[in-house]
Image: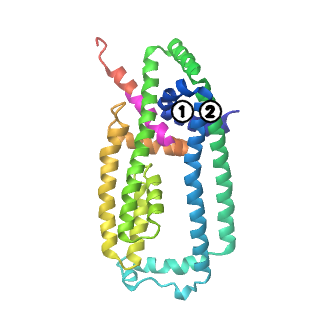
Amino acid sequence: MLWAFLPALAWAGVLAIATWPLYSLCHPHIGRTWTAAGLVLGLAAGLLVPIYIFGAEAAREAAAALEWFQHLKPNDAVLPQWLAKTPLIGAHIAAWPRELSAGLNIGTVAEWGQSLGAQLISRLLTLFIAMVILFCIYRHGDSFLEQTSTVIDRLFGRAAQRLAMNMIATVRETVNGSLLIALGEGIAFGVGYAICGLPHPALLGALTGILAIVPFGAPLVIGLAALTLFIQSSPIAAIGLVIFGSLVIVAADHVLRPLLIGGAARLPFVWILLGIFGGISAFGLVGLFLGPAIIAALIALWRDLARPAHL
């Protein structure tokens, strides 16, 4: 009965865990209801405003691109000669514009638009339900936590409580660490895009930061930006962007992410990656935060069972 609402429940739980310290700090001063309402509205605005900005910008860019492709004749879709002469892949790259301009039509764009619209409505409905659940969690969270602690203690003992606290700490660290890394990478790459002379550097930087929440997600935007610079006959800027991006990503994914996310359960880097990618594969985007928590609980259980009995 509740299967269709599991994504909303999962998102509400993740957001509640990540923001519970802030809620606990505020509600004694301004009341539970007002604190819950303020946090829910703030989180909803923080999620919807970027979606609106990116959606509006993407719609404008898509309209301009569609108009360009409609006026583009297959014979005129020619890339720079140096790119077409690239060994092994040059011929295939040179054929892309002609194939794309020949295959793109209004019907295809309309189908894409309908599919995207349906997905957007579904995601917004999930977000609305998650915000309603989150408000209820804020309002009644303390009593629920007390009941949950009692039930876990009766059914599984103190060891299960330690595992649950370990999972909660890992979820909180994963959310906070991922957001901090995304913010840092978004600012750094926004500056880098501006120096390279790319259009809309702030928007590209924000998009890179959003994709940076997923490990190795930022290279997708960086690669497209570097390819754009190559096509615009700016190979030095493209190479510089790739080098700069590689340094930032290595520092973020291989140094900062394990420190920020692996602290609670002392997770090795490989287990962090397996938890993140496995969680995304199993649960979707919310698995980005649930995956490391599940791995943390399993590793903690393994350590407890592997400890010698006399200890």
Q: Where is residue 22 in the image (x, y as percent from the top left)?
A: 48, 32
Left or right, 283 with respect to 190, comes to right
Residue drawn at x 55%, y 78% is 99
Residue 147 among those drawn in magenta:
no
Asked if 182 appears above or below 87 in the picture, the reply is above
Q: Give the residue pinned by disc 2.
A: 135
Magenta-colored stretch includes residue 289: yes
Question: Where does the C terminus fall, quadrant-wise?
Answer: top left
Residue 291 drawn above or below residue 233: above
- The coloring applied to the image is rainbow
The answer to which image quadrant residue 143 occupies is top right
Within 10 Å of the Cα at label 1, are there few (<14), some (14-19), or many (20+) other Cα atoms? many
Q: Which of 72 and 85 is in front in this view?
A: 72
Estimate the x, y position of residue 192 in percent, counting from the top left: 36, 63
Q: Quadrant of the N terminus?
A: top right
Q: How far apart are marks 1 and 2 (CA)?
A: 9 Å
In this picture, which residue range is highlighted in magenta?
Answer: 287-299
Q: Position of residue 82 (x, y in %)?
A: 36, 83
- The secondary structure type at the circle numbered 1 is helix
Residue at 35% of width from left, 39% of height from top? 260
Q: Is the magenta region chiefly helix, strand or loop?
A: helix
